[in-house]
Image (cartoon, helix red, strand yellow):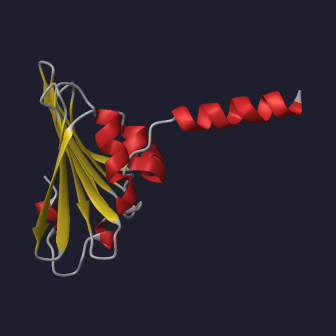
């Protein structure tokens, strides 16, 4: 019985999608590409790397990675909002706890936490947003690059 439970747990863990979570490691970008079934394009910029994944529906997820290999920002655009709990990882609690500084019902939201910023805008089956951790943004980079 115990062996069956262990096997089930292993199978369930293997089926959980991996995302390059905010504050996480760059190595999960490849897993994101597989989950989104998209094409990845990598660009080197001064002070950071940009990994852009374009899915088959045209939706785009951009992951901004510091020279230390940490994801400091995530941006998205396309049809629908991606699973923010997956993308934000431990920062997902900030969606509830952060101070909503601007809310336009069914259109836009801006949330600022202690060390977390999220802005999202959407209309008519199109969504655009970004989230970043100010303390993880490299010192020679502006948080405005996360878009």
Pick out the residue farthest to the right. 1
Q: Which residue sits at x=60%, y=38%?
A: 13
Left or right side of 59 for 13: right
Q: Position of residue 22 (x, y in %)?
A: 37, 55
Q: Which one is in front, 105 or 115?
A: 115
In this view, 19 is above or below 50 = above
Residue located farthest toward the top when viewing the structure as drawn: 124
Please report the residue visible at 27 percent of the width from the left and 33 percent of the height from the top.
37
Quarter of the picture containing the N terminus is top right
- Visible residue check, residue 94: no
Q: Looking at the picture, does residue 69 appear above or below residue 19? A: below
Which quadrant holds residue 44? bottom left
Count how many numbered circles sit on residues in the image. 0
Q: Residue furthest bottom?
A: 140
Using the rendered view, name the quadrant where residue 112 is placed: bottom left
On screen, 69 above or below 56?
Answer: below
Image position of 24 (left or right of 109): right
Q: Residue at x 30, y 63 (%)?
A: 72
Residue 33 position within the rendered picture, expressed as x and y whole percent measured from the top left = 29, 42
In the image, 105 versus 89, the foreground residue is 89
Q: Quadrant of residue 83?
A: top left
Coordinates of residue 50 in the picture (x, y in percent):
17, 60
Res. 145 visible in picture:
yes
Q: Closer to the camera, 63 or 147?
A: 63
> Could you say where residue 101 lies in the image, as x and y percent from the top left?
26, 48
């Amino acid at each position: 019985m115990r062996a069956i439970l262990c096997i089930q747990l292993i199978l369930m863990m293997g089926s959980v999608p991996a995302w390059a979570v905010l504050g996480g490691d760059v190595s999960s970008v490849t897993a994101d590409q597989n989950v989104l079934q998209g094409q990845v394009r990598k660009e080197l910029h001064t002070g950071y790397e940009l990994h852009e994944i374009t899915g088959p529906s045209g939706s785009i997820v951009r992951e901004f990675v510091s020279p230390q290999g940490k994801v400091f920002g995530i941006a998205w655009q396309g049809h629908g909002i991606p699973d923010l709990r997956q993308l934000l990882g431990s920062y997902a609690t900030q969606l509830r706890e952060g101070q909503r500084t601007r809310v336009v019902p069914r259109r836009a939201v801006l949330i600022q936490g202690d060390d977390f910023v999220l802005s999202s805008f959407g209309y008519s089956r199109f969504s655009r947003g970004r989230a970043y951790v100010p303390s993880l943004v490299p010192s020679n980079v502006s948080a405005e690059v996360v878009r």
